[in-house]
Amino acid sequence: MSLFYKLLRMLALTKERELTCSEVNELLDYYVELEQSGENVKALMPTMTQHLRICPECKEEYDALKKITGIEPIMATAQEAS
């Protein structure tokens, strides 16, 4: 997929109010704790889930935290979802 189409896709997924990477990093531990406890994080924190879907840097942090905690990520990467 070309850079142009990747940018168009990211624009299409953009919401009016989004979390910044800094905000996501502050909430990441809480997000993973909720996920570990069996909560539906996609429904509880849709803005966070959306950010992780479109931001490769934050998704990498999320995956690393999941690996450290010993549970499998439930979210597919942006490339896998396409």
Image: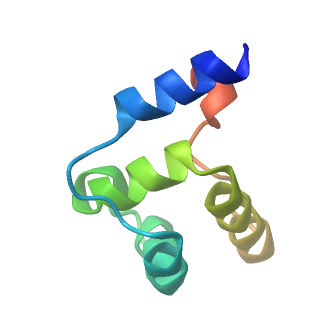
Whether residue 33 is visible to the viewer of this picture, yes or no, is: no
Q: Is residue 58 left or right of residue 67?
A: left
Residue that appears at 68% across and 26% down: 79
Check the picture and name the quadrant holding the N terminus.
Answer: top right
- Examine the image and state in which quarter residue 5 appears: top right
Residue that appears at 24% across and 52% down: 43
Q: Is residue 20 above or below residue 78?
A: below
- Examine the image and state in which quarter residue 7 appears: top right
Residue 22 % position (x, y): 51, 80
Residue 64 % position (x, y): 77, 67
In this orientation, which residue lies closer to the viewer: 10 or 44? 10
Q: Is residue 53 above or below residue 5?
A: below
Q: Is residue 11 left or right of residue 32?
A: left
In this orientation, which residue lies closer to the viewer: 80 or 24? 24
Whether residue 17 is visible to the viewer of this picture, yes or no, is: yes
Numbered label tally: 0
Q: Is residue 40 above or below residue 27?
A: above
Check the picture and name the quadrant holding the C terminus.
Answer: top right
Q: Is residue 55 left or right of residue 33?
A: right
Q: Is residue 57 left or right of residue 41?
A: right
Residue 37 % position (x, y): 43, 72
The color scheme shown is rainbow
Residue that appears at 24% across and 61% down: 44
Residue 51 % position (x, y): 45, 54
Residue that appears at 70% across and 68% down: 61
